Amino acid sequence: MKKTQLAQLIAGIVGVTAATGAFASGFQLLEQSGQGVGNGFAGSAASGEDASTAFFNPAVMPFMDKRTQITFGLDMVKPTAKFVDEGSTAPRFISAGKLGGDGGDAGSWNAVPATHMTFGLNKDLSLGISLGAPFGLKTDYEDSWRGRFHADKSDLKMIALSPSIAYKFTDTFSASIGAVYQHFEAELTQAVNFGGVVCDVAGASLCPLLTGLGTLNDKEGFSQVKGKSDDWGYQLGFAFQPSPSTRIGLAYRSAVSHHLTGDVHITRPTFGIALIDTGLAQRASDGPVSVDVKIPDTFIVSAFQKLDDKWTLQGDISRTGWSSIKTLDIYRNDGSLLSSSYYNWRDTWRVAVGGSYQFDASWKFRAGVAYDQTPVQAEFRTPRLPDSNRTWVSFGANYRMSEAVSFDLGYSHLFMSSSSLNDASYHAEYNPGGINTTAPLNNGVLKGHYDGSVDIIGMQVNYAF
């Protein structure tokens, strides 16, 4: 079998797209505190109300009223993503009766836990430790849906540990530095049109014969790719407090380059022709794979203003460097390219404004709004990320049970713009080796739009020593 034919065969079998999409833009998870859910995460790098400061901006730790704290949080997140078909084209050799439906709701309830600790070591020096999930995704369609040759299940999991140290150089200025350790796991699945794959390999001389005999009809298989990686980044923070009622924070988290290693598992149908079945068993076998993914950097500028004894106002402007994700290239261990996908993501901005009202000694109420850009451009959208721009509306409350213990509860609803989709699994501007030239035929063209939203419930217990 020629090398280019083998590349086409493998690409058709392991045509896996990038894992994308979550509850902030892309697959970013802002949900690191129940307190932040209550005001749309406005002022996240400046407020310093509890130990979640260790995640958002450790430089604020020396300015906290109670500098030694621990916070346990759990955010429950329910994305909704429903596809509406608008003239999709079936893959070749797949019967119309087996094309399938619209896939149901691809979203499901997800739990996002987080734990944060801050320690005041002396009057100027503070230590922070944060454990959470800053990136992640899970979408899962019905197995028989019409877009199964583009995406079935996408599951990303990340655990990040972030130790940091902060020092107050003057009464008005502090800075922090820290490490970021990330453990990253990914699972991607989809259906495979083996009839189309065999036709490509057989070529113009044999494919018409096999087609006429009906050999290639409705020959579906399944591919699953799993991988994991561990790597390190860093974080920097600065805080400026010109008065007890005003604080400005700047926080930066570096990009982290992951080299995920794992395996591809392929389920193949039987054709009943020894040459085809033996060839697929040899050429489309299970085996080790790897992929490089660069998790983006983030930059936040926040402000916190205490208006009087009752009212505070907070604001956020943040940038996420999603342009680090342009392509997804999956390789076997021998260096051969298995699958190549083009995403061309762009950097995004998020703006949030919120405030709080101290009702009495026990109760504080919060609210906020935010606007969050998607990194996905319409012409590159895939069903793994039916992502679009979103508007946050948030409400929350803090109840103080004692001087040491308080509880936060927050709710956010994210209104998502309707997002169009016209996915052929192929982009002419990025097609190394010509391995994706038959993707529109073998995968079909998935055309329509998504209606979506997200609901977030945030809960948090704070203990100050």
Image (tube, rainbow, N blue to C red):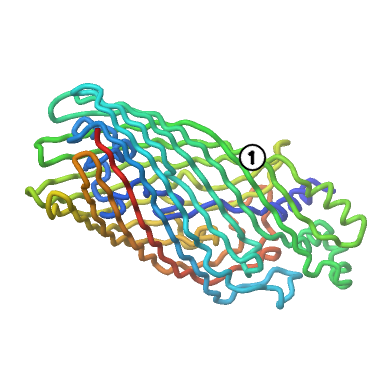
Q: Return the x and y of residue 455 as percentages of the image width and height.
A: 38, 62
The image position of residue 362, as x and y in percent, is 17, 50
Where 464 falls versus 461 (above or below)?
A: above
Looking at the image, the residue that sits furthest to the right is: 274
The residue drawn where x is 77% and y is 69% is 218
Using the image, determine if residue 346 lies above or below residue 462.
below
- Residue carrying label 1: 290
Q: Residue at x 34, y 29 (%)?
A: 164
Residue 7 in picture, x, y percent from top left:
74, 49
Closer-to-camera residue (426/48)? 48
Secondary structure found at label 1: strand
Left or right: 76 in relation to 1: left
Q: Sort mark 1 into few (<14), some (14-19) or many (20+) by Cα contacts within 10 Å.
A: many
Q: Which of the pair 109/245 is nearer the observer?
A: 109
Residue at 66% over, 68% down: 144
Q: Is residue 224 above or below residue 169?
A: below
The residue shown at (10%, 37%) is: 244
In the rendered image, residue 330, in percent from the top left (x then y), is placed at: 64, 44
**Dot 1 amino acid type:** Ser
Q: Residue furthest front?
A: 402
On the image, which quarter does residue 394 sit in? bottom left
Lateral position of residue 243 relative to residue 206, left or right:
left
Q: Is residue 8 left or right of residue 411?
A: right
- Residue 298 position by quadrant: top left
Furthest residue in direction top, as rendered:
122
